[in-house]
Amino acid sequence: MVWLTAALGLVILLLAGDALVKGAVNLALRLGVPALIVSLTIVAFGTSAPELLISVNAALEGVPGIALGNVVGSNTANVLMVLGIPAMIAVMHTAEHDTRKSYVIMLGASVLFIGLAFRGTFDWIAGLILLAALAVILGENFYEARSHRRNGKAAEAQEAEEVEGADPEMPWWKIVLYLVLGLVGLPLGADLLVDSAREIAQRFGVSDTVIGLTLVAVGTSLPELATTVAAALRRQADVALGNVIGSNMFNLLAIIGIAALIAPMEVDAEFLRFDLWVMLAASLLLMPFVFLGWNLTRWIGVLLSVAYVAYVLTVLA
């Protein structure tokens, strides 16, 4: 039963997160908020809402291992699994796209996160530092995107249509329904998943951290996996790589930043000895694809996937 409850919580989380994004995006566009701001803020926060609710709920319930394990494990899974599996399906020609700046920012966020972890706890001070870094990055992205944007209503209309979840024909009742489903479903799903994960950890004699790094992390990485598989099949390597880089940066700065402001989280010593360095090593594996123009071939996809399986087995052992 506990496994079914965990699966139900995960499904509710993913569906509620998607509903919240659709409702919030269309409400913002109807109220005249520029599409650029919507895409940089509402979509970014909304798609990370399941991870955020899990981390906040876990922090409040006194299981920081699930909160931190969810983020660290998701970042490792995003590189090794979320890029590895799609690469086995279709070669991704990353040489055609420039993601160097975003990648360097992601590495910087990883180093900042690891540095704060060695303080022993993610408290309100660490939370403010992470959110300040996020604000600087979002501000720079907004300024850069705005400088490249063409003026005129036609450009704004086209930009609005390209925002994830945007539907110019969506009626008001449907927008409200999506918002209600999202706002009710997210805390419900997070509560079910965190409670079930904690019970599974107790039943199998493993730590909350292990469950956070494996079960919860893989579950919350499924939307990124689906997006990346679709991008690989459409030969959109920039979308696949950008999805992983953006998600990892947001996980570290926004999710832990907000959760740390709500409740302090002690850092498990095992994170400092092993898991944080695996996360950083996985991020560094992307360097040849970003800077040297290597393509993500099927064999590389196999190697990345095998590396992830080896990591999970090591954590479980």
Image (cartoon, rainbow, N blue to C red):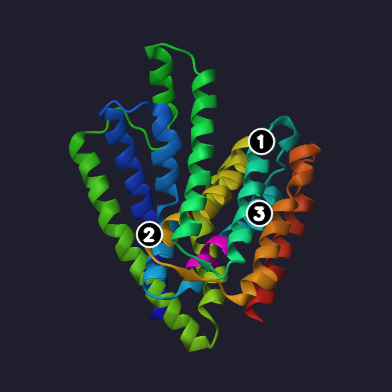
Where is the N terminus found, in terms of image quarters? bottom left
Residue at image location 43% in from the left, 48% down from the top = 47
**Towards the viewer: 1 or 248:** 248
Residue 184's label in the rendered image is none
Amino acid found under the numbered disc labelled 3: Val
**Towards the viewer: 42 or 133:** 133
Disc 3 element: helix
Q: Which residues are magenta?
A: 67-73
Residue 137 counted in the magenta span: no
- Going from N to C along the chain, the mark reached first, 1 or 2, is 2
For mark 3, what is the residue? 111
Amino acid found under the numbered disc labelled 1: Lys
| Residue 93 image position (x, y, % from top left) | 73, 37
Query: Taking 53 as reference, is 200 above or below it?
Result: below
Q: CA distance from mark 3 to mark 1?
A: 16 Å
For mark 2, what is the residue? 13
Residue at image location 67% in from the left, 82% down from the top = 317
Q: Is residue 52 left or right of residue 303?
A: left
Amino acid found under the numbered disc labelled 2: Leu
**Towards the viewer: 222 or 111:** 111
For mark 1, what is the residue? 101
Disc 1 element: helix
Query: Taking 284 as reference, is 174 above or below it?
Result: above
The label nearer to you, 3 versus 1, is 3
